[in-house]
Amino acid sequence: MIVPLDHTICDVKFQRRSLCVEFGDGRSLCAPLEWFPILNAARGSQLDDFVIADDGMSVAWPDLGEVVSSEFLLGRRVSGSARGERML
C-alpha cells in the first residue's frame, strides 16, 4: 500500500530544546533549536506566538521575523522571500 505524502504543516510544538512539526500525513519531525538561532534565543511566550501559513508550507513567528518552511525541515531546499525576509 502506498501512502501519499502530505508536506503541509499542521502543528508546531517545542520539546527539549527542539522544534517539532507535525505534517498532514501524520509524520512528526523534530529539529534542534540550534538550527534556528532566532528561535533558540527567544523566550517561551515568543515561541508560542507562531502562525502556520494558509497553504501549510511554512510556519512564521511574526514578532521575531522568522519563517521556517516545510521544504527546509524535510531537507529539500532552502527558500528565500522576494521581500528579503528570512525563510529557512
Image (tube, rainbow, N blue to C red):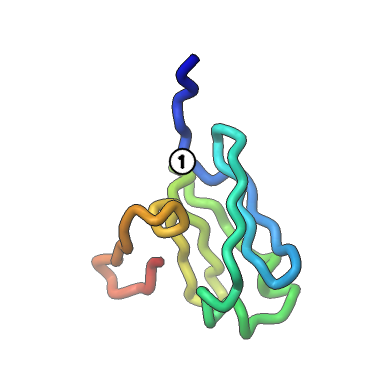
Identify the residue at image location x=48%, y=45%.
56
Say which quadrant the C terminus sits in.
bottom left
Does residue 48 sit above or below 58 in this rendering? below
Residue 76 in picture, x, y percent from top left: 34, 53
Q: Quadrant of residue 23?
A: top right
**Residue farthest to the bottom, as pictured:** 41
Identify the residue at image location x=46%, y=41%.
7
Identify the residue at image location x=51%, y=74%.
35
Q: Identity of the amino acid at label 1?
A: His
Query: Dot 1 surroundings within 10 Å: few (below 14), some, or many (20 or more)?
Result: many
Q: Nearer the viewer, residue 8 or 25?
A: 25
**Residue farthest to the front, as pictured:** 1
Residue 27 in picture, x, y percent from top left: 59, 40
Residue denoted by label 1: 7
Horizontally, residue 67 falls left or right of residue 11, namely left
Horizontally, residue 26 falls left or right of residue 36, namely right
Residue 81 in picture, x, y percent from top left: 29, 66
How many numbered marks have been drawn onto this rendered protein structure?
1
Horizontally, residue 76 falls left or right of residue 23, namely left
